[in-house]
Amino acid sequence: MKQEMMEITSQRQLAPRIYEMTVKGALVEQMSVSGQFIHIRVPRNDLLLRRPISINNIDHEAGTCRTIYRIEGDGTRVFSEMKAGDKLDVMGPLGNGFQLSDIHEGDTVYIVGGGIGIPPLYELSKQVIALGARPVHFLGYASKEVMYYEEEFRALGETRIATDDGTYGVHGNVGNLLLAASEIPQAVFSCGANGMLRAVEQLYLGKVNNVQLSLEARMACGMGACYACVCHLQDDETGQKSLKICDEGPIFPAGKVVL
Ligand code: FES
């Protein structure tokens, strides 16, 4: 993990409150695993904490990494107002990332995301394809209005979409999409809110050996020092044991942590 002043090379709005930002710098050389995140300092002195943002795409040739984020408060609003050529203080890459050592040629891999948990699944899907496996994407959004990256995911493989309000695709959530899927894949990778991750765990734990869940967490330091991001272990009756999502996660095998 390193820290660098990275240059913004592009910034565009994808949907209401949702932005795509690409940054360039030597830090990209350290990035290879999907599901990791970068920790970006807000360039305003009254906003002390960095903001964790997942890596959406790694381009080693261009030396860039792309992120997609949603405006949640002042920090992310400041990011959205920045332009190409501006510099950002970035730490990363952070987190463990998805483990692909058990993915083989010809495997079917379910890639399941909801809302602002969807961005890191794009780099993941590219890497799954590079291993000769077949991704099937299951994406859930609140509504058609806040959808993004449909075409990008369709370009990588089969993509099924649900919206909570029924304005596009299947009316319902990602769980509805998964219930309608008939095959048993070799692996299931998911990122999103805990409710969605619980549904994925209930459907596939014990049926599929390789189920990896990426948790969204509020973070402060982002590097294991402050305990702002802890989660608890499922098999711990005392309730005392915990893991830090920022550096021991954000990805855990299904069945490991309390969601
Ligand atoms: Fe500080 Fe995870 S955010 S320990």
Image (tube, helix red, strand yellow):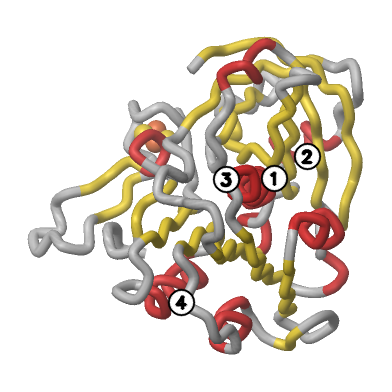
Of residue 20 and residue 71, the one placed in the foreground of this image is: 20
- Residue at label 2? 77
> Which amino acid does the dot numbered 3 rest on?
Leu
> Which amino acid does the dot numbered 1 rest on?
Gly
Instruction: Give percent across and percent down for residue 171.
Output: 73, 88
Q: Compared with residue 218, is residue 6 higher up or lower down, i.e. above or below?
A: above
Q: Which mark is residue 199?
A: 4
- Residue at label 3? 131
Badge nearest the viewer, 1 or 3 = 3
- Neighbours of disc 2 within 10 Å: few (<14), some (14-19), many (20+): some
Badge nearest the viewer, 4 or 1 = 4
Instruction: Give percent across and percent down for residue 197.
Output: 46, 67
Instruction: Report the Cα–Cα distance between label 2 and label 4.
Output: 31 Å
Answer left or right for 32 relative to 208. right
> Which amino acid does the dot numbered 2 rest on?
Arg
Label 2's element? helix
Locate the C terminus and report the quarter of the image it occupies: bottom left
- Residue at label 1? 73
